[in-house]
Image (cartoon, rainbow, N blue to C red):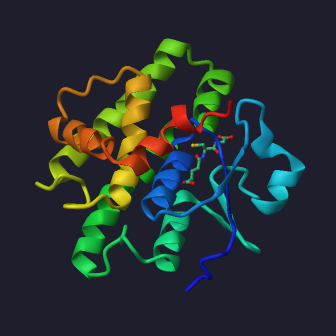
Amino acid sequence: MIHPQTPLVLHGYFRSSASYRVRIALNLKGLDYDPVEVSLIAGEQRSDAFLEQNAQGFVPMLVAGDDVIIQSMAIIDWIDRSYPEPRLIPDDPMPRAVALAQANVIACDIHPLNNLRVLKYLTKDLGLNEQTKDRWYQHWIIEGFEALEAMAGEGRYLGGDAPGIADCCLVPQMYNARRFDVPLDAYPRLVAIDAACMEVDAFQRAHPDAAKPA
Ligand SMILES: N[C@@H](CCC(=O)N[C@@H](CS)C(=O)NCC(=O)O)C(=O)O
């Protein structure tokens, strides 16, 4: 178990949904951390200093004492193993598989197709206009949300009675969906779960509007 006093520093960007997931997880655990804003717009994730710690050049990156952890799902798993209460990823094999499958619909099958470098490639390298790029963006959310709506259980949260790793992924993805005008009427379970999460202080404090530097 990690020492409770180990300082945690989260390198992220207020609007990055992968960073948003980790902010939620840290807040749900009641952990204090120092946020370091990495401006993706200014390209700070590509600076030599950042690449030295994170060869992939992505946010989020969590620094815990002398350790550097990258990839939001690995970071949430590390947090969950280091600070076990409340659990974000169940221990039992079947609930664990369900939670990770729900989370991965977003983390593996929606988000990577829509992140900044993909959108830049579509517009700058392949010459897509803004309207076509937005259609691309919406398409992958709609396809993923159709599946996730069917996979959502009866609980207040995707995690059941308490928020879990899939809720950490859902709320930022809903934020992105709204930013890109994806109609959400077809996903009443996801809308209700998102609303339930947003009643929880840990989710409210992680919102991009709260994380945005002054
Ligand atoms: N699979 C990674 C994805 C991280 C990712 O895509 N981060 C985006 C922001 S949400 C980023 O840093 N983009 C920088 C870029 O595309 O240059 C994770 O879950 O951490």
Quadrant into which the N terminus falls: bottom right
Instruction: Kindly identify the residue that appears in the image at 48 percent across and 13 percent down.
Output: 131
When asked about the image quadrant of residue 185, the answer is top left
Q: How far from the left and from the top, in percent, is residue 138?
A: 38, 27
When asked about the image quadrant of residue 165, the answer is bottom left
Q: How far from the left and from the top, in percent, is residue 205?
A: 48, 44
Residue 186 or residue 143, whichever sits in front: 186
Give the vertical position of 12 relative to 131 (above or below): below
- Position of 109 with respect to 187 (left or right) is right
Residue 81 or residue 108, whichever sits in front: 81
Quadrant into which the C terminus falls: top right
Instruction: Kindly identify the residue that appears in the image at 49 percent across and 45 percent down.
Output: 206
- Position of 163 with respect to 169 (left or right) is left
- Position of 196 with respect to 188 (left or right) is right
Give the vertical position of 129 relative to 74 (above or below): above
- The residue lying furthest to the bottom in this view is 1
Q: How far from the left and from the top, in percent, is residue 42?
A: 78, 31
Instruction: Kindly identify the residue that appears in the image at 17 percent across and 30 percent down.
Output: 186
Q: Is residue 109 visible to us here?
A: no
- The residue lying furthest to the right in this view is 48
Q: Is residue 69 visible to us here?
A: yes
Q: How many marks?
A: 0
Q: How far from the left and from the top, in percent, is residue 83?
A: 49, 76
Instruction: Kindly identify the residue that appears in the image at 66 percent across and 57 percent down.
Output: 61
- The residue lying furthest to the left in this view is 154
